[in-house]
Image: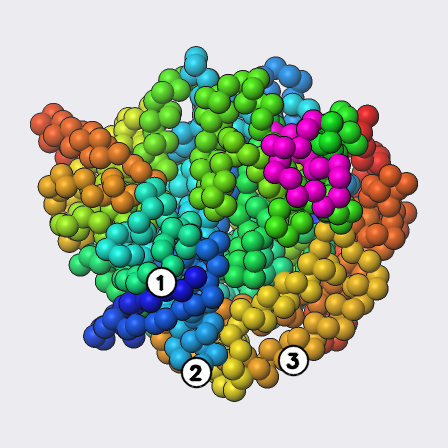
Amino acid sequence: MKFSLEVWRQPAGDAAGTFTSYEVDEISPDSSFLEMLDILNERLTESGGEPIAFDSDCREGICGMCSLVIDGQAHGPQRATTTCQLYMRQFDDGAQITIEPFRSGAFPVVRDLVVDRSAFDRILRAGGYVTVHSGPKPDPNDIPVEPEVAEKAIDAACCIGCGACVAACPNGAAMLYTAAKVSHLALLPQGQPERFARVQRMTEQMQKEGFGSCRNYGECEAQCPKAISIDFIGRMNRDLLRAKVTQPIDFRGDMKTQ
Amino acid sequence: MDLDAKIPDGPIAQKWTQHKDAIRLVGPRNRPHYRVIVVGTGLAGASAASSMAAMGYQVECFCFQDSPRRAHSIAAQGGINASKNYRNDGDSTFRLFSDTQKGGDYRSREANVWRLAELSTAIIDQAVAQGVPFAREYGGMLANRSFGGVLVERTFYCRGETGQQLLLGANSALAREIGAGHVKMHTRTEFLDLVVADGRARGIVVRDLVTGAISSYAADAVVLASGGYTNVFNLSTNARGCNVTATWRAHKRGAGFANPCYVQIHPTGIPAAGEHQSKLTLMSESLRNDARIWVPKQKHDTRAPGEIPEAERYYYLEERYPRFGNLVPRDVASRNAKDVCDAGLGVGPTGFGVYLDFRDAIAENGIETIDERYGNIFDMYNRITAEDPRETPMRIYPAPHYAMGGLWVDYDLMTTLPGLFAIGEANFSDHGANRLGASSMMQCLADGYFVLPITIGDYLSRHPYGEMDTSHAAFGDTEREVGERISKLLSTTGTKPVDAFHRELGSLMMDECGITRNEAGLRNAIEKIPELRERFWREVRVPGSGASFNQSLEQAGRLADFLEFAELMCHDALDRDESCGCHFREEHQTEDGETLRNDEDFAHVSVWEHNAVGTEPTLHKEPLEFEALPLAQRNYKT
């Protein structure tokens, strides 16, 4: 197969970027999108050029490292699919394809198609955990969990943290990511003690990072490679409201050292 | 090389408890003064870093990915073993221990394997407390599935994404410690060398992958949790970034490398489609619970699978191994797949594939049940191959998957280099010559949550904290060597991309040091690898500069290390003149083609000492003793 690519090139975070055109041919329909870029990069290297920088690692749709906007859609045209799991057979022979990085003020470009998504990690650090040390714990069967609840929790927990929701959102909101993290733990009995402090801290950090606000466009769910439902955003908002109305911001300040 | 494994005395079931009681500890007031470096943030690294930080140690943690959550543990699919005996089917610590020993073909250290089995149940408790959403039964109890090589159901799982959920659990603990300021996290930062002074590990030299800056970090101990070296085959189930650099550079600085020839070739990978392929995708081993594996009886049969009548299908595993059938251990399954394909019975465009068929399971259990179990794996397969396993059988072929070999460690997980520890897949550890399914995550988390945080205290307590900082000459010297190596890579004047050499190395290693090996092939590889290495340095082109984000440079550095390491792997495979587990030497097989061990001469761990690149390494041996479970021939047939 043969493709005309328009690729965003930007030598460094503080440099100006531009679209550059490339022609690639002799591509197998069984190549993944990233393998097509690998081939282009090998050819660029051989001909004395600079290969295109892009992130990828596991190449099986789970690590969340790959991050391209392809023809205006995060991870490209196939629903519920990461870029690394997108195959060239999904495109017409001879197609023109535009490739950009995930764009958002909170995701600064590092180089070419590579962005900095560390804002997501900072949201997680603000509260996306259950406070437990390593060591002896109760037997899990002492606290039964309905299978439906465990399933729902996995529906949220299967978020791969790629940032497609942010890239897809016209406002650049990180609500789906944050909601998935909050809901996973809010659903499970283990997450209850810190439930309301967690939702407040994580949403607060999310705002500090400069992500936009949610206007219910629903683009995040449509472009999420794991098809995570925006119902989780509603769930998070309900928890946030409950937290604000009924729970003090942080009652740990009253704990006395013994 | 001192290979005292420091295995505690006493009956095997008491060793770990007694050892914990006997070793020295660092008190809570002193811990904040000690600094520990952890390289890697997979299950082992994240669990170790978070556990040690929570105890009070200062932890500096490094990963090359943009976030610690992306380490390749995240891709583990099937599950994690624990001898909880929730199914009341006779499971126990002893059974998990003996299954692991037997699965590893009696090439692991008994005391370590017992400890692993003993700690397995605590891992599940720990993960659930963190909020890992394991699958539950209708009554709310944890669900189990069975896995290859065992006769009990002891595998815990979260759909086909167990690794993801366990890593997110460990990563959430790590995130908490980073947030609290106990762990300093360095993302997009690659380990490039170990700093050794006065015979002890003192710190590391790293490169910031965004700015290209090279810098040093000093610590009281260094922990490598940098994973395995299976990408030496180029095409493997590992992530593209997985590499041998950390363990190889540590080896060159004096750490013994144990059993490098033990590599597991997983039986259920998707066959490669062509040269463009960048990695092999694994289909979870759990599929073998419900699917039947077969090939056409007729050679080079080009009919569609649905058109091949039952009588013309060869269910080779069920016929050859009636008791375990499709659930034989991974090495047995892989070798048999290669065997039928080499005999011309393979399917698919390349002829290197066998069918994994769900037809009977769907007829028996209904499509809903099967979909519930494997739906996401079916979808993944469909995306890659454009075929739906619900309608047509999957095609699978063995794929290099896991490295049992790694840095030699004693019972405390310390390498031969004092102050340098290795955990998870990076050490040679507990899996002998073959790892059973659902055991890798168990080992990573046992090491990280429960073993290292305690045993490292014994080493630390014997030395004052903050003994050395980066102003010591050893740091400057190591930094300079790292810088020179990078300059050398950037000043190559060839035209070929790095990947071209990686493909060449991979195919050589797959041919000569892969599913089966023989003396002539290994000698051939030992001759060819230095030639390839020399051509690499002459013909490669590494574009760009060292002072910027440069992925070609990263790849080139990693491949340069693989090109040295591959030779060691072949030396080890050549020296081990027996077959055991995944190491199948064609010269040593039983009449029916099974591995034939030689316990007389090879019941030892082979530990290699580095001399110089291109010269023969020196072999040292740690003899293995078998007290709790006497040596026996593996037999999955009756």
Magenta span of residues: B291-310
For marks 2 and 1, give the one nearer the viewer. Answer: 1
**Residue B13 falls in image quadrant:** top right
Instruction: Identify the image quadrant of the N terminus of chain B.
Output: bottom right
Question: Residue A48, labelled with which disc?
Answer: 2
Q: Secondary structure at mark 2?
A: loop
Chain bearing tag 1 is A
- Estimate the spatial distance between the alpha carbons at disc 3 and disc 2, rounded to whole Å: 22 Å
For marks 1 and 3, give the one nearer the viewer. Answer: 1
Query: Circle 3 is placed at which residue position?
Result: B534
Instruction: Identify the image quadrant of the C terminus of chain B.
Output: top right
Chain bearing tag 2 is A
Q: Nearer the viewer, residue B541 or B177?
A: B541
Vertical side of B265 occupied by A246: above or below: above
The percent position of residue B620, horizontal first and vertical second, equals 78, 60
At x 45%, y 81%, the residue is A47
Q: What's under tag 2, amino acid-wise? A: Gly
Query: Circle 1 is placed at which residue position?
Result: A94
Q: Nearer the viewer, residue B209 or B129?
A: B209
Q: What's under tag 1, amino acid-wise? A: Gly
The percent position of residue B229, horizontal first and vertical second, equals 60, 57
Vertical side of B246 occupied by B146: above or below: above
Vertical side of B620 occupied by B628: above or below: above
Q: Secondary structure at mark 1?
A: loop
Choose the circle earlier in sequence order: 2 or 1: 2
Q: Secondary structure at mark 3?
A: helix
Q: Are marks 2 and 1 in contact (CB under 8 Å)?
A: no
At x 33%, y 55%, the residue is A67
At x 62%, y 59%, the residue is B233
Chain bearing tag 3 is B
- Estimate the spatial distance between the alpha carbons at disc 2 and disc 1, rounded to whole Å: 25 Å
Does mark 3 fall on the same chain as mark 1? Answer: no
